[in-house]
Amino acid sequence: MKAILWMLGAIASFCSMAVGARMLSGHLDTFEVLTLRGVIGLLIIMSIIYWRKQPSLFVTQRTGTHLWRNLFHFYGQASWFFAIGMIPLAQVFAIEFTVPLWVLLLSALFLAERITIRKVVAISFGMLGVLAVARPETQGISNGMLVMFIGAIGFAVAIIYNKRLVSTEHPLTIVFYMTLMQLPISALLTGGDWTMPSTTDWFWLLVVGVFGISAHFCASKAMQSAEVSSIMAMDFLRLPIIAVLGMMLFGELFDWWVLVGGSLMIIGNMIGQNVWGKRQKAINSL
C-alpha cells in the first residue's frame, strides 16, 4: 500500500510538472525555465540536507562521473521541455517510456552486457510501441517527436552513469549535484535572452520546480517499497492521465494510437525489468 501511495504521488508530480512546463511554453525561453527551475530545486535540496543535519551529503569523490551524468541528463531534460511545447503531452510521455529500452540497448552495445532473448523481446515490443505512437507511414515523424526521441537517449545514457553512482552516492547527493551542475549550463545557454516572469509565470515556475523534486523523491520511495516491475505497471497510468489533462486544459485530441503504443512500450519495459530492474532501485534522476 505504501508503494502505491508513493507512486501515485510521483504520477501526480510528473503530470503537474508537465502542465506547468506547457503553461510556460511560449512565455519564457526554455533555458530560462530550466535556470529558474534549477535555482528552486537547489534551494529545496540544500534545505532538505541541512534539515537532516547531514552536511556530508554535499561531498563527493566522483565529480567526473557526476559531470558526465549531468551533461547527458541536461540534454534529455532540455529536450523534454522543448518537446512539451511542440507535441501533445501524451506523445511526450509515451516516447519517454522508451528510456528503459534504450538503457537495455546501450548497455549491451557499450557496457558489453549480455544480449538475451528476453532483452530482444523487450526491445522489440518497445520499437513496435514507437511505431504505433509515431505512425511514420501516415503522418511522418514530427520535429517534436524527433527531439523527444533524441532526448530519451540522453536520459538513457544518464541512467547508465547513474547506475555507477548509486553504488556509493546517496540519492540526495546525486540530486544536489544534478541541480548544482546543470544550473550554470542552463544559465549560460540563456545568455542575454532573459524575460522577467509575470506573477502567473512565477506560480508555474514554482510548480515545475517543486513537483520536479517531489516526482523523483516519490518515485525513489516507491521503488524502495516494491519491485520495480510492479512500479512500472503503475507508471503507465501517467499516459491516460496526461492525455485527459491535455484534452481538458489545452484542447489536444485524444489519440488511441498513443495509448496502444504506450501499452506496447510498458510491456517491453516490464519484460526488460525482469532482467535488470532489481538492480535499478535508485532510478531517481528522470
Image: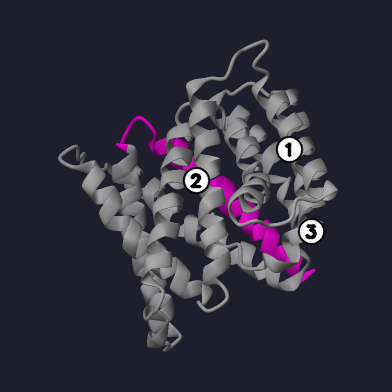
Front residue of 58 and 126: 126
Residue 58 is marked as: none
> Circle 2 sits in a helix, a strand or a loop, which is it?
helix
Pick whichever of labels 1 and 3 is earlier in the sequence: 1
- Of marks 1 and 3, the one in the foreground: 3
Left or right of 198, for residue 165? right
Pick whichever of labels 1 and 2 is earlier in the sequence: 1
Q: How many marks?
A: 3
Asked where in the image residue 189 lies, by quadrant, the reply is top left
Q: Which residue is mark 3?
A: 275
Q: Give the x, y percent position of residue 130.
A: 68, 30
* Structural distance between the alpha carbons of marks 2 and 3: 22 Å
- Range shown magenta: 1-29
Residue 126 is marked as: 1
Pick whichever of labels 2 and 3 is earlier in the sequence: 2
Q: Which residue is mark 2?
A: 154
Disc 2 marks which amino acid?
Gly
Residue extending furthest toward the bottom = 53
**CB atoms at circles 1 and 3 under 8 Å apart?**
no
Image quarter hosting the C terminus: bottom right
Front residue of 121 and 143: 121
